Image (tube, rainbow, N blue to C red):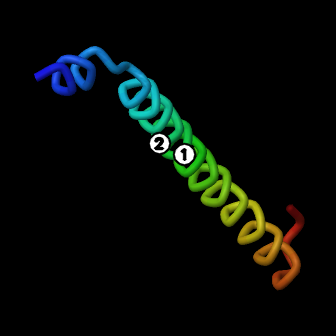
Amino acid sequence: MEMIKNFIREEDGVTAVEYGLIAALIAVVIAGAVQAVGTNLNAVFGSVRDCLSSSHTC
């Protein structure tokens, strides 16, 4: 019974879970930012490609 009470009072596992959730949230934010930058960068390179392949001024 004492072992169960000690397990319930233990907070190290809770802290580890909180750090894991924070790390996961940061990873999701970074993935979203990289995807947004990649999409914009793809559009810029597409625009440059179109300008270089045509005789139009850009």
Q: Residue 10 carries which label?
A: none
The residue beneath circle 2 is 24
Residue 2 in the image: above or below residue 16: above
Q: Quadrant of the C terminus?
A: bottom right
Residue 19 in the image: above or below residue 55: above
Q: How far apart are marks 1 and 2 (CA)?
A: 5 Å
Where is residue 4? Give x, y as percent: 16, 25
Where is residue 24? Give x, y as percent: 47, 42
Q: In the picture, residue 53 is in which quadrant?
A: bottom right
In the image: residue 41, left or right of residue 57: left
The amino acid type, in three-letter code, at marker 1 is Ala
Q: Quadrant of the N terminus?
A: top left
Q: In the picture, residue 14 is in which quadrant?
A: top left
Residue at the spot 50% in from the left edge and 31% down from the top edge: 19
In the image: residue 16, left or right of residue 31: left
Where is residue 46? Give x, y as percent: 71, 71
Residue at the spot 55% in from the left edge and 51% down from the top edge: 31
